[in-house]
Image: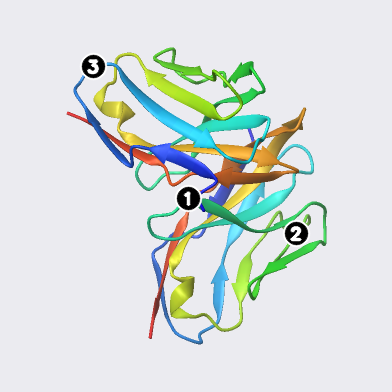
Amino acid sequence: DAMVIQNPRYQVTQFGKPVTLSCSQTLNHNVMYWYQQKSSQAPKLLFHYYDKDFNNEADTPDNFQSRRPNTSFCFLDIRSPGLGDAAMYLCATSRDEKLFFGSGTQLSVL
Amino acid sequence: GDSVTQMEGPVTLSEEAFLTINCTYTATGYPSLFWYVQYPGEGLQLLLKATKADDKGSNKGFEATYRKETTSFHLEKGSVQVSDSAVYFCALSDWYVQGAQKLVFGQGTRLTINP
């Protein structure tokens, strides 16, 4: 059974049109992360939550926001997607130095 | 900042061949090191890890040894199977605070095993 669930698997949006990606977890982990993985590149941490404490990486663009309404759910909001934001977005949780990843959402920007 | 460099792919081998995927890292401290694997259509999964110098991580026939002197963490398997076809990511833990950690990943190596 999937423990970190990302929906949808594929998301298409238009240039400049806000989009939200969703992640849920059944593991009850305190920490949740969002990573961005562009084609043939390493996954890159955007931000993480410890419970409701939000931690932004210094080089994460302001265009990216996140919400965590409860332990189980976390959302990635891209306010004005550009062509350069097309990527795979990976959600993860962690416990004891082990990360659990979802299958990712592949975002296309037209 | 900390970084990870992996052997470029793709790598194609025949079943039962010996596998090595090279990984080297740059870090200011003594990070934990990891190999993650991503099977087609799935998320990344932890394959193995090592937390200090000379530690050997192992799982599913794969091994990697934390070599501080060469700043390396090469992945090896003695006899690969078709089911090992996947993308392999080397990573280090840049920081670990309050139960959260930042993983710095290499770019991934795609491995294909032919029967």
Per the image, the residue denoted by label 2 is: B66
Residue B105: mark in rendering: none
Identified by mark 3, the residue type is: Lys
Callout 1 environment at 10 Å: few (<14), some (14 to 19), or many (20+)? many
The residue sitting at 68% across, 30% down in the picture is A30
Between disc 1 and disc 2, the foreground one is 1
Q: Under tag 2, what secondary structure? A: loop
Where residue B84 appears, as percent x and y from the top left, is: 49, 72
Q: Under tag 3, what secondary structure? A: loop
Question: Can residue A37 be seen in the rendering of this structure?
Answer: no
Q: Is residue B5 above or below residue B88?
A: above
Q: Based on the displayed image, in which of its 4 quarters is residue B103 positioned?
A: top right
Q: Is residue A65 left or right of residue A70?
A: left
Report, in whole angstroms, how far the alpha carbon at label 1 lies from the one at label 2.
25 Å
The residue sitting at 30% across, 32% down in the picture is A86
Q: Based on the displayed image, in which of its 4 quarters is residue A110 positioned?
A: top left
Where residue B31 appears, as percent x and y from the top left, is: 75, 44
- Mark 2, chain letter? B
Q: Is residue A42 above or below residue B84?
A: above
Where residue A91 appears, as percent x and y from the top left, is: 50, 36
Report, in whole angstroms, how far the alpha carbon at label 3 lies from the one at label 2.
46 Å
Residue B43: mark in rendering: 1
Quadrant containing the C terminus of chain B is bottom left
